[in-house]
Image (spheres, helix red, strand yellow):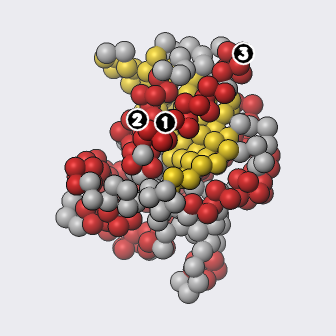
Amino acid sequence: MCICVGVKVRAVRRDRYKLRVTTWGSGGAPHAIVLPGLSADSRALAPQIRMLRSQVATVHVIDLPRMALPPSLMPADASFPQLADQVAHVADELGIRRAVVVGHSLGGGVALHLALRRPEFVDGLVLIAPAALGRSLHWIYKLYCLPLIGRALLYPRSSGQRGFVRRFLIGSLRREDHAFVDMLVRHGNKARERALSSRAIVWANQPSLWRRLLMLVTPGGEQAAFAVGDRLRELSDVPTLVLWGNEDRVICAGDAVRCRDFHERAETHVARGVGNMLRLEAPAWTNGHIERFVASLRPALREAA
């Protein structure tokens, strides 16, 4: 364990894997658990982590295997329910009985599966452009499923990365903010170290073979293997906040409608001119909604403490 300036960084073992946990705060309840997206770490949610530290006693960021620590995930261990079980194991090891769970993209999908498997654990769900709500993903996801092409795409190089960030990851609001784009590129350069785990997650959660063949000629269905579907109704008693950018080219913001269809108590908000990097593109907007949502949970959080 490494401790510096009030931050604890530790490795929690689950079978053959190690998950890095970065913790701020007293270590007591109420807790918040933050789950970054695919091939991301705490930097991707830094504004939200800073805000949460003022709202709850303890904030934990859980990095999946090889997003921080080796060994890399194997496809046999990388389905969404298995990833949710890994997060639950970390919580048990740390003695966390209940928490507000915040997840972006992949992390949002893992949070959804965690809530379905252990609804009593979740004081509240904050889902930022989450996977597992709808059916479609960006068309490039199909290429990730092809061995040689997917390997190349999941080992991004700095050359050409700037164009990818501007075209696919961010919206019109920040597209011409060169300092912002350069910062995202710098943070993304280390993604090649996480490529094996990223590829394992992609391959483990592919749709069936016939669906993959159908996807070659018709759009949609990339999330068919891990979308929660109408099981979202099972979370009707879990307070849920869903935030999205209307220019998200990775996961369609239209998926937020499913929350209204299957989870009547879910609160949804969509920011204009913003893409998949919502939590960094519009941090004040994102944090404002999360701060108000967490404040609404305080009676339950005080009871948990």
Residue occupied by mark 2? 47
Q: Quadrant of residue 24?
A: top left
Q: Amino acid at mark 2?
A: Pro
Q: Nearer the viewer, mark 1 or mark 3?
A: 1
Provide the residue designation for mark 3.
303
Badge 2 vs badge 3, beta-carbon distance below 8 Å: no
Q: Earlier in the sequence, mark 2 or mark 3?
A: 2
- Identify the image quadrant of the N terminus: top left
Tell me if label 1 and label 3 are in contact, CB under 8 Å. Answer: no
Quarter occupied by the C terminus: top right
| Residue at x-position 37% and y-position 56% | 173
Kindly identify the amino acid type of the residue bearing the numbered disc 3.
Glu
Please identify the quarter of the rendering in which residue 127 is found: top right
User: What residue is shown with label 1?
Assistant: 287
**In this orientation, does residue 149 appear?**
yes
Amino acid, disc 1: Asn
**Mark 1 or mark 3: which comes first in sequence?**
1
| Disc 3 secondary structure class | helix
Nearest the viewer among 172 and 252 is 172
